[in-house]
């Protein structure tokens, strides 16, 4: 079944409880979150990907959560990989971006069989140019890693 075929309410319920496993070739990713902004982005961007109901061993188990101490006052979100938080929390309005960056971190740090290239691509009339970037390029904070 594709994600778009799953009713949104059921999608949110599964994400918030046991998690939802998606096939994002070449990976399988189990995702948990009760953060609506993260869920909205995942549902919109991954609509055409397959939902795996019986995947006992996904490649990555990730979550986007709300830190207990910052739930109401200047809300934040954090990314978890197998319960480990590799990054500092970000403002809650960046929940979906946090998921995307975290997933990229998982691939870049844990799968050494793929070529990782930090770049932008521009395409026109079927031709493309790759504009490589240095690590950290585009970072808007002075204390980024």
Image (cartoon, grey):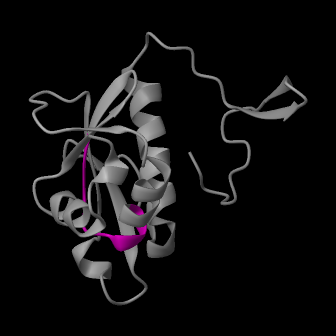
Residue farthest right in this picture: 125
63 vs 119: above or below: below
Q: Position of residue 125 (x, y in %)?
A: 90, 29
Residue farthest top in this picture: 113
Residue at 37 percent of width and 52 percent of height: 4
Q: Is residue 118 part of the magenta span, yes or no? A: no
Q: Position of residue 131 (x, y in %)?
A: 83, 29
Q: Quadrant of the N terminus?
A: top left
Closer to the camera, 54 or 99? 54
Q: Quadrant of the C terminus?
A: top right
Closer to the camera, 129 or 119? 129
Image position of 83 (left or right of 130): left
Residue at 66 percent of width and 41 percent of height: 136
Q: Is residue 35 part of the magenta span, yes or no? A: yes
Quarter where residue 26 is shown: top left
What is the total number of numbered labels drawn onto the structure image?
0
Quarter where residue 55 is shown: top left
Region rendered in magenta? 30-38
Residue farthest bottom in this picture: 73
Q: Position of residue 41 (x, y in %)?
A: 46, 60
Q: Position of residue 77 (x, y in %)?
A: 37, 67
Residue at 16 percent of width and 58 percent of height: 14
Residue 89, can we see it? no
Residue 132, can we see it? yes
Image position of 39 (left or right of 119): left
Residue at 40 percent of width and 57 percent of height: 43
């Amino acid at each position: 079944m594709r994600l778009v075929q799953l009713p949104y309410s059921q999608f949110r319920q599964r994400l918030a409880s046991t998690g939802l496993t998606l096939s994002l070739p070449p990976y399988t990713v189990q995702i948990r979150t009760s953060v609506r902004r993260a869920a909205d982005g995942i549902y919109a961007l991954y609509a055409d990907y397959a939902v795996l109901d019986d995947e006992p061993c996904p490649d990555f188990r990730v979550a986007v959560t709300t830190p207990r101490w910052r739930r109401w006052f200047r809300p934040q979100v954090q990314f978890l990989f197998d319960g480990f938080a590799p990054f500092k929390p970000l403002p809650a309005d960046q929940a979906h971006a946090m998921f995307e960056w975290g997933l990229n971190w998982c691939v870049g740090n844990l799968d050494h069989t793929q070529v990782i290239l930090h770049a932008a691509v521009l395409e026109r009339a079927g031709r493309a140019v790759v504009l490589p970037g240095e690590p950290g390029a585009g970072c808007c904070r002075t204390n980024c890693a």
